[in-house]
Image (cartoon, rainbow, N blue to C red):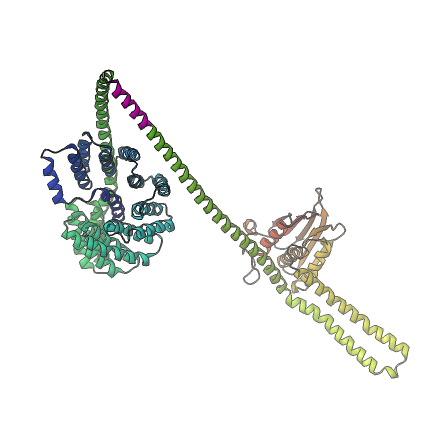
Amino acid sequence: MHRLLFLLAFVFGICMFAHGQVTPAQADSLEAILKKPAGNIERAVILNKLATYYWQTNPKQSLALIKTGLALPLPDSLQRDLHETMAVAYAILAITDSSFLHYHQALDLSWVLHDTVRIVRTNTNLANTYWVQGQVETSLATLLETIALFDSKKLKPQQKAGTYGTLGVVYSLLANHDLALHYDSLAIDMLIDVPSRRTTLNTIKSNMANHLIDAGKPEKAEVVLKEVIVLEKELGRALILGNSYVTYSLLMGKLNRIDEAYESLSEALAIFQKGNFAREEAQALSELSGIEFKRKHFESAEQLAQKGLKQSEDVKDWTGQKNATFTLMQVALVKQKFDDAARYELKYRVASDSVVKGKNVEATTAMRIKFDTQQKEKENEILKRDQLINESKLRTRNALLIMGAAIVVLLGTLLFISMRLRNKIKKVNLALKRRNLEIERKNMEISKQNNVLEHTLRELNETQLQLIHSEKMASLGQFTAGIAHEINNPLNFIMGGLQGITHTLKNADSVPHTELSQDLGDLIAPLEKGAFRVKKIVDSMLAITRHSLNDISSCDLAENMKLALMLVSTMPEMKNITINMATENAPVVECNAGEINQVFINLLTNAVHATQGAGMIGIIFLLDHHGHAVVKVKDNGKGIRPEDLPKIYDPFFTTKPAGQGTGLGLSICRKIIERHSGTMKIESTFSVGTTVTITLPVVQHQLM
């Protein structure tokens, strides 16, 4: 509610800048002047000032005064002022169509008068009316059109400030907090050194404080609100000062600085009481009771809530009644007065329902007022049309007598039409310029979004490659102990052989040459066998750890499978497992050998774990009818449960005990196969076994 008051104050503040604020004493003086004889222009000026005074207190009276003024024969400049004042009055009454009609009539007259400053101001007021009525996008378009007008006319900075301030409000409503704060800052910079515009400056600062809160910058909002409160004390606008304290209190509540929230709301309450703002006082009492409850001052909370409830009932303010009864209900529960709590809960529900119903009643009333006003306007239009017809007959009769005057009137009419056409062309050009600016802005935003998406894609690709390499290293880590054992055995054999050779050579002089040669040959043969075994294990590890991710080479899938088996065979669980591998039809394909080896190791390791150290693993190679290479790895292990099958490719999903799996193996395997334009299919029957089928193209142009 308080924020809406600030925003509406901004709307009215711009309009007040044109006419000057009228005090109650001045209004009484103007009413007295109206009762005396006066010229049309003087009466119209007085009627316009009084109409602005009645905006907030009696907008219907404001409409009646303006209609009286428009009935007078007046110059275009005064007619424009009256139309703009009437537009604001209709906007306050929520009669949107009539408000927009009079704004456009005021704009047309400003274009005829070539008054750029008034065009800017009226466009800004029109934009304010759009967003108050919920047409935020239309408001933004109007403001952008107005800003485009800045480029074609030399305007003083303070003449642009109102438009930029309104643009800040609109961008805030569109949740674009950065742009809202940017235009707030521009408007403030333009007015900071203009003493005569302090009222507008402080209203824009009030909006900026709310925008900072929305942008998640409460500390900066606190600084700005303190500045607003200081200046409002100087300006003497009691209602807005009180509402500023209320906003500051709400901010302190969000920051959990309850004592400061209490002090600020107490200041607001004192201002409302002094200024006889009964509705605001009732709501402040109700909200203050809620703060006292949070401070656990239950007696004070109850007293304030009782006062707030009584005053809210006096002024028929359901919002205050709702807040007060809620606090009283909470206090009753704390004191365990459950009957009182139930009674206040019933009142709270009634007040809540009435708040909702009140909004519906207000909407219905506004529609009824709008309908009645439109009916009266139609009647006035008919009367004006009849009057115009009579006047046209009179002019025609006079034109026959004074031909020269008729020619002058004709030329004047042609000149007026020409000026209107020129003004319409200007409007079209301004609209096109605004569209171009909007298109450029959207293109910049799209470009920024594309850059962000490209950067994110690069990071995802790098992360995926790192995961593949990390999983490969993790797989090798599982075989470390087995590989060490497999290398240690032939090394011990080699060490024993070397010792035998050393001993034989020491006794070479006492042994016949033929016998010596035979002994050395018997010792060297096992050494060669052991060294060959070590070389095969090392070659297998080198082939697996090769991580040049984009290298493509021709690979015999059976040979790659043998390298994988070499490493997997070092696992202790492999002792009682039978490997059946048919290599007769093994195809040769183009692939990244390191990645394919990683897939084979992962599948074989899963099969070993599934058979639980006793069983059979079958490996088949073939070419399908499409000419694609097919590899099948089948085991007779425990299989996969049906409910787990849909999740086996999910990253970090695993059915293995803690510490025996990362849950990334199958996910990375499928990504590797898809990078090779292949497919991976898993078929499993629980307690029977699992078959993994991999299909790869024989020719590989480029890894995906």
Label the magenta part by its dominant secondary structure: helix
Q: Is residue 406 magenta?
A: yes
Number of marks? 0
Residue stretch in magenta: 402-417
Does residue 333 appear anywhere in the picture? no
Does residue 250 appear anywhere in the picture? yes
Q: Is residue 91 above or below residue 265?
A: above
In the displayed structure image, the side of residue 691 where residue 395 appears, left or right: left
Whole-percent x and y of residue 279?
Answer: 18, 47
Q: Residue at x 30, y 52 (%)?
A: 188
In the displayed structure image, the side of residue 90 where residue 610 appears, left or right: right
Answer with the quarter of the image where residue 294 lies: bottom left
Whole-percent x and y of residue 2?
Answer: 25, 49
152 or 600: nearer the viewer: 152
Q: Residue at x 75, y 53 (%)?
A: 583
Q: Is residue 265 magenta?
A: no
369 or 432: nearer the viewer: 432
607 or 155: nearer the viewer: 155
The outermost residue toward the front is 404
Q: Is residue 135 above or below residue 252?
A: above
Whole-percent x and y of residue 413?
Answer: 30, 25
